[in-house]
Image: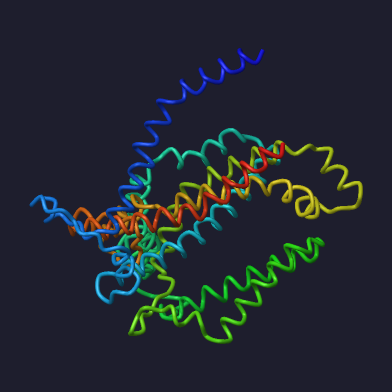
Amino acid sequence: MTERFSRDRIIGILVLLPSIILVGIFVYGFIVTTIYISMTDSNTVQQLSGTQPNFIGFQNYTTLFTATVDAGRFRTDLVNNVFFTILFIIACLVIGIGLAILLDQKIKGESLFRTIFLFPMALSFVVTGVVWRWLFNPTSGLNALPTAVGLPAFQFDWFISQDQWLKFNWQSLPTIIAIILLGVVIFFALYFWSHKRSQLAAFVTGIAILLLASLALDIPSRFNGLRNPEAKGFNLALLAVVVAAAWQMSGYTMAMYLAGLRGISDDLREAARVDGATEFGVYRYVVFPLLQPITLSAIIILGHISLKIFDLVFVMGGGNNIQIDMPGINMFFTTYRGGQTAIGAAIAVIMLLMVAVVIVPYLWSSLRSEVQH
């Protein structure tokens, strides 16, 4: 029995070995290479002349976060990416759960509606970008609809708008991040105390005290690397991109939620109704808690898509519209149009870290749950 188990295990390893080698070379090998290039001064001129690049450490990253000329675009990209990710995820979750609840009512023509809602997902972001670029054209598209009934056209600028909300100074970003972290830590501290998990609660409370002390001593502001104020904020032009992206991906979220709703036993809902719960109460106390794993999965997938988005924004903005610019577009232009390979690699590494922040905790949690079961 033991010999057979060992033989099967060896065969399994040999079958997987080619895939492991290929993934190691073409995924993780290239990631390591990109990280190394990001720590050099590599550029197109050096590559064409055969000159070896010099190792400069984290200088490219310092340039991206503190330089006052070209790197200002990268900082705008980060702000745009954060706002876009938040709004995109919220829009997809709200629309997706709404459509799923509607279809779960066993309405007539459910299969037709389900197909209609899912159809946008079959399109590429390039096609979606072309369609919504025309619809959001300030001189035609949706703005021209009122003229069909003799009314004046709308004057929305859509994806070329230069208006901003929620303005802040980039120099204040370390303090803003510290305040947000403090709020998150306090939330978890209260959660752990309420669930009588004393050790975790005490640890998290200690972190909250340290963050509060650092804010009182104004320590976060010392990490600012900019000499002059730099205004950032939520560019209203991003709303056009959010609408286009949510239109395409909300059907996917709807399918996930619909599968989850169909997996909830009707006996649970009936038991809640017998106990006196209203229909809203059934969803609040029974359905929505059971859909939490699906919500988490949807957030991870949508966050992964939004953090590395390129094609939709490129088609809608042409690559030169700073109001809707994203790190992926900046990386493309910096590397292949500007010839600054090392800085482009640094942007790619930062994008990788942003995606890892979303993906790694989810994978760790999933593997941990599998081991426990």
120 displayed left or right of 268: left
Colour approach in the figure: rainbow
- Across and down, in percent, residue 160 comes to 32, 67
Front position in the image: 218 or 153:
218
Q: Is residue 99 above or below residue 307?
A: above
Instruction: State the residue lying farthest toward the front.
Output: 3
326 and 133: which is toward the camera: 326
- Percent of width and height locating residue 352: 41, 53
Residue at position x 38%, y 75% from top? 163
Outermost residue to the left: 49
**Does 303 sit above or below residue 163?**
above
Residue furthest to the right: 275
- Which quarter of the image is occupied by the C terminus? top right
Q: Residue furthest bottom?
A: 217
Q: Is residue 41 left or right of residue 187?
A: left
| Residue 355 percent location from the top left of the image | 46, 53
Q: How many marks?
A: 0
Nearest the viewer among 246 and 77 is 77
Quarter where residue 155 is shown: bottom left
* Residue in the image at 63% along x and 72% along y: 183
Q: Residue at x 35, y 41 (%)?
A: 29
Left-right relation of 56 to 253: left
Which residue sits at x=46%, y=47%? 248
Q: Where the N terminus falls, by quadrant?
A: top right
> Where in the figure is residue 336, as x and y percent of width and height?
20, 53
Q: Is residue 123 above or below residue 37?
A: above
